[in-house]
Image: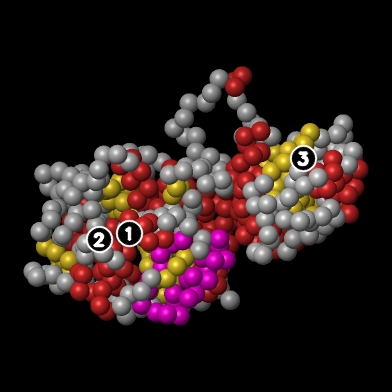
Amino acid sequence: MTLSLTAGIANLGALNTPLLVVALPNGGTLDAELTSLDGTLGGVLSRSLQRRDFRGGRDETLHFAGAANGPGRVLLIGLGKATDRVSSLRRAGAVAARQGGRMGAGSLAFYAGAIDVREGEALAVGLSAGAWEYTDTKTPPPEEDRRASLTSAQIVGPDVAIIEQAIASGSAIAEGHSLARTLGMMPGNLCTPEHLANTARDIAARHSLGVTVLGRSEMEALGMGSLLCVAQGTPEDPKLIALEYEGGTKGAAPVVLVGKGLCFDSGGISIKPAQGMEWMKFDMCGAAGVLGAMEAIARLKLPVNVVGLVGSTTNMPSGTAFKPGDVVKSMSGKFIEIINTDAEGRLVLADVLTYASRYKPAAVVDAATLTGACVIALGHSATGVLGNNADLVKEVLGAGTRAGEPGWELPMWDDYKELIKSDVADIRNSGGRPAGTISAALFLAEFAGDFPWVHLDVAGTAYTEADIVTVPRGPTGVPVGTFVEFVRGRAG
């Protein structure tokens, strides 16, 4: 369930809310509205600042009981050194919502002084992200142990019209994040290629989008031997999903977003270690990002033509699975030598990128949890960004920064192509451990055609195996924000 967001005028001392959240930067002071609230609370806010019990550091919190009237409780949250107020408010919103959920508040009000539309939008996204939870496969606790989930939040400030505008766009983006995180968190036996296809059909029905779903037989007819070799070890029908949003000029070249949808990746014959393999249900986060972005883009009614493409299957070991040493023929006609069956995502994307060329795209951006090497190179703080067009790379990096999903460009020098040369085919699917993220992107570049193309390696950023304050263990929603900001940037 997505958080219900409303706007309200700031009259803090009289707010009838279970929890009032006040965001302050490092070294922040009380404005007139907070000074009034401080009087209602007997001066506890000013004393806490004077004693430096609360300093406004990033993620810092201080909790007070309310007075007889007004807010039931007050929670101070630090913004840190507010050099980037948009990002700080997005983060503070997530922390606030998570704290409100732990308290069982049910609803909260959030005050950060005067905010503009971008700040309010980021706050709305953060609040929604912090309130998100996945309970579909959990038995509810006994009634006496239950706490109320956070279901609503009000952003209060001096200008309600600006806040309402911010909430309208922020809620649309939050819906996309929520969809992507829900798909990511679902167990692999529930989030199957067919489920992703049905999700796309649902998005199309609700927003009047075009939708095409190809199965194994249709892909065989198109010669998608690269994608299908990954799918030959599983009885589940693979899916190529296309969602078409026509928000721009009729006939104008679309932006194409591409996502890797491996609903479970065992590694195939090159099987992964058993420890931690359960995390491989997240190997479809690129696909979830595309579907979430298409949901948000349709809600925002952006004036751009956009196509979302997903290639989905599972990578399983069996008597029919593809194996190291095999050579397969891709849809492009290029032959690929299989070196490692755990380098399967690029095989799926190869045919999807070739399929993308039929749309004569203005630009293509793909996202995939593609390489462990990217996690080694960049950790969990930045997405790997590589592409064949310097201007497009810069554009995508800017979109990621605005969305709070930073990326870092890695080189695609010709020297690295030596890593994926094959003795028996046109190219091989793995260049080994050195420069693994780069050689994987160079493999994809062979199928990107002549159109401007950027690859996002989200292996380290699409999900987290530890609680990271703003997000619990599980999916983060990356790269929904980057996709949406990129398309919105194209809207002018």
Whether label 2 touches label 1, CB < 8 Å: yes
- Does the magenta stretch mainly form a helix, a strand or a loop? helix
User: Residue shown at 13%/56% (left/top)?
Assistant: 324
Question: Which comes sooner in the sequence, label 2 or label 1?
Answer: 1
User: Residue shown at 24%/56% (left/top)?
Assistant: 344
Tag shown at residue 373? 1
The residues bearing labels 2 and 1 have C-alpha atoms spaced at a distance of 7 Å
As helix, strand or loop, the secondary structure at mark 2 comes to: loop
Question: Which comes sooner in the sequence, label 3 or label 2?
Answer: 3
Task: Name the side, left or right, on which 317 lies relative to 128.
Answer: left
Tag shown at residue 74? 3
Whether label 1 touches label 3, CB < 8 Å: no
Question: Which comes sooner in the sequence, label 1 or label 3?
Answer: 3
Q: State the quadrant of the C terminus.
A: bottom right
Q: Is residue 390 magenta?
A: yes
Tell us which disc is closer to us: 3 or 2.
2
Q: State the quadrant of the N terminus.
A: top right
Q: Residues within 10 Å of mark 1 (few under 14, many from 20)?
A: some
Q: Quadrant of residue 460?
A: bottom left
Residue 214, horizontal then vertical, whole percent: 29, 57
As helix, strand or loop, the secondary structure at mark 1 comes to: helix
Q: Residues within 10 Å of mark 2 (few under 14, many from 20)?
A: few
In the displayed structure, would residue 24 be above or below residue 141? Answer: below
Q: In this view of the protein, can residue 188 be seen by the observer?
A: no
Q: Is residue 460 magenta?
A: no
Magenta range is: 382-404
Tag shown at residue 433? 2
Three-letter code for the amino acid on which mark 2 is drawn:
Arg
User: Residue shown at 27%/68% (left/top)?
Assistant: 439
Residue 189, horizontal then vertical, whole percent: 33, 38
Q: Residues within 10 Å of mark 3 (few under 14, many from 20)?
A: many
Task: Name the side, left or right, on which 290 lies relative to 223.
Answer: right
